[in-house]
Amino acid sequence: MKSKIRNIKYIKYLMKYFLPISASVYFCLCLSMRLTVRETSYAGEECMLYYIVNADGMKGLGHSILMVVDGEGCGTVLSFNGMQRSLSESLMGKSGVGKLSDGAMDAEETEAFLRSGDLSLEGDQLADNYDMALYRPITREEYRIVLEQALPYKEAEEEFTVLYGKWVTEEDTAEKAAYRQALKQMAEDESLPLYQIYTNNCDHAARIIASSVDQDLSDYTCDAWRMTPNGNLKAFGKKAEKWGVMELGEQTLAENVLMFLVSL
């Protein structure tokens, strides 16, 4: 009985002091990470690089994509998602081959996307509304390098697709088992850019690909500890003052709240 009374007192103590203090500290953290619209201070170049987040993507944790725009104003969007594993398996920490969806827009469509945030392309997370972007000019050579970094993701995806097709259609039991084993081995092959929801998700891929042409982002990615796309975009945006910050379209109340509160 005495032990039960002590536990009740401890819970009341937590409710009275610890939780309000923790909430206040977290609120101050969110306030300190709030980004405001600003222009980039990088010298003008022919092409552009955008690191973009959908605040209410992935159930409110956010979803990151990357976009490069060429000298004619045409945009190419890259979005990394899990493919080999189900959501439940991913949440259990299992890795697997991912799908790097890509979509192309002409100059008019690219401009409309940056004004509204509305993306209407085929592919995972490429038909959605996006909310905030960090951006900077890049050279034509850097534009080429960014797209080149996407090739290993596409090659792994294509290899998996071919192998999976053979496994599905194979009728010989022994051969089918061999294909299944090969698929399992792919999910554990560390030489591939595997999707892992905690260590190599959409946001990691966007930052890693963009890091090939930006040393500040490369340095940040090496030490990044925040878990969500929203948190990483804001944390990097606060450090990388040379990058511009822009909002894409009008934000809903829910998007503003998520963009403010999701900071880890």
Image (cartoon, rainbow, N blue to C red):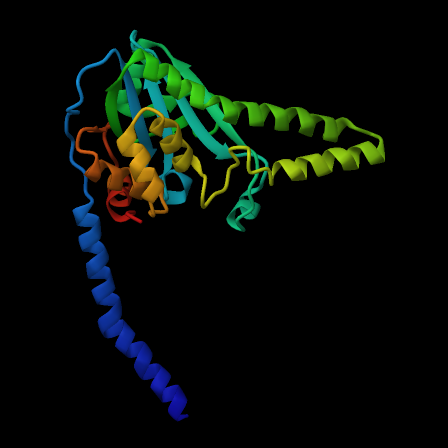
- In the displayed structure, does residue 21 sit left or right of residue 230? left
Inspect this view and state whether residue 132 appears. Answer: no
Q: Quadrant of the N terminus?
A: bottom left
Residue 145 occupies quadrant = top left
Residue 169 occupies quadrant = top right
Count of numbered marks:
0
**Percent of width and height locating residue 28:** 18, 54
Q: Nearer the viewer, residue 19 or 203?
A: 203
Residue found 53% across the figure and 45% down from its top: 90
**Percent of width and height locating residue 202:** 42, 35
Quick check: 242 above or below 230? Answer: above
Residue found 63% across the figure and 35% down from its top: 186
**Percent of width and height locating residue 258:** 29, 44
Quick check: 223 above or below 77? Answer: below
Q: Nearer the viewer, residue 74 or 248?
A: 74
Q: Nearer the viewer, residue 60 or 176?
A: 176
**Percent of width and height locating residue 178:** 77, 35
Quick check: 154 above or below 85? Answer: above
Residue found 29% across the figure and 78% down from its top: 12
Inspect this view and state whether residue 107 appears. Answer: yes
The residue lying furthest to the bottom in this view is: 2
Residue found 20% across the figure and 39% down from its top: 238
- In the displayed structure, does residue 15 sit left or right of residue 121? left
